[in-house]
Image: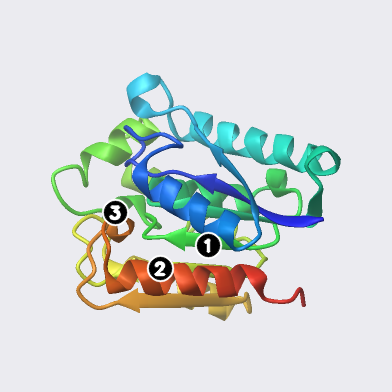
Amino acid sequence: PLPSVVLVHGGAFVLGHKRMKPARFLAGLLVEAGFAVCSVDYRLISRGGRLPESLEDVSVALGWWTNQADMWNLNPSRISLVGVSAGATLSLLVAGGPQARGVDRVASFFGAYEFDGLRGPIGDLLPRLLLESTDRQEWRRCSPLHAPAPTCPVLLFHGTQDALVPVEQAQRLVDRRHAEGLPTQLSVYEGAPHGFLNMPCEARDDSARRLIEFLKEPVQ
């Protein structure tokens, strides 16, 4: 039976799809390394979706994929979530919820972990649209940093020149998980921007290598 990955694309919750460039790059990488891949779409803000709807879609996709284990010769105990940007945020929230159904591990590429700490022109606008609230305490409550944490191993990738999500968000999430005794790794890339999977660069190549190593680590 094959280990497998449910792959969740990025796009700031506003745009994007399962065939966008970073998703294609990761899907090809994973298949070449011996994984089955289920790349999924979810409802976006631009199509009437908010955080609850996006989470529901990823959760349903994860459940569907798990139920296909016999059909696709999947190992049901080796199903991981890999998310990019908004998809990384969703992956962590789903893996920490009751609907996770035994996610083996989670890899998160430059996800947003604190909705009340985003940068740039969409920093304040995005949480208002995504959460339909202007209450910053609500933004904090819904963020991965403050939501129930996945107990499975987690690997985070982040660049120091991320203009949307400060790298300190990833570091605080790691600190919280370590304080709770949860297995967590963080790879920080000096000078790498948000979305570094879109371009050939050292950060993309090294994170690809580390991703496969992480997903192939023996089950403890």
Q: Is residue 87 visible?
A: yes
Q: In this view, does 208 lie to the left or right of 117?
A: right
Q: Give me the residue at 39% from left, 75% from top.
A: 206
Q: Distance between the residues labelled 3 and 2?
A: 14 Å
The first of marks 3 and 1 along the sequence is 1
Q: Which mark is residue 198?
A: 3
**Label 3 neighbourhood size at 10 Å, few (<14), some (14-19), many (20+)?**
few
The amino acid type found where label 1 is placed reads Ala
Q: Where is residue 77 in the image (x, y as percent from the top left)?
A: 80, 58
Where does label 1 land, which residue?
A: 107
Query: Viewer-proximal residue, 53 or 155?
Result: 155
Q: How far apart are marks 3 and 1 (CA)?
A: 17 Å
Where does label 2 land, which residue?
A: 157
Q: Is residue 27 left or right of residue 117?
A: right
Q: Give me the residue at 55% from left, 75% from top.
A: 184
Q: In this view, does 12 lie to the left or right of 81?
A: left
In the current view of this chain or complex, which residue is farthest to the left? 121
Is residue 135 positioned above or below 161 on the image?
Answer: above
Q: Give me the residue at 32% from left, 41% from top.
A: 12
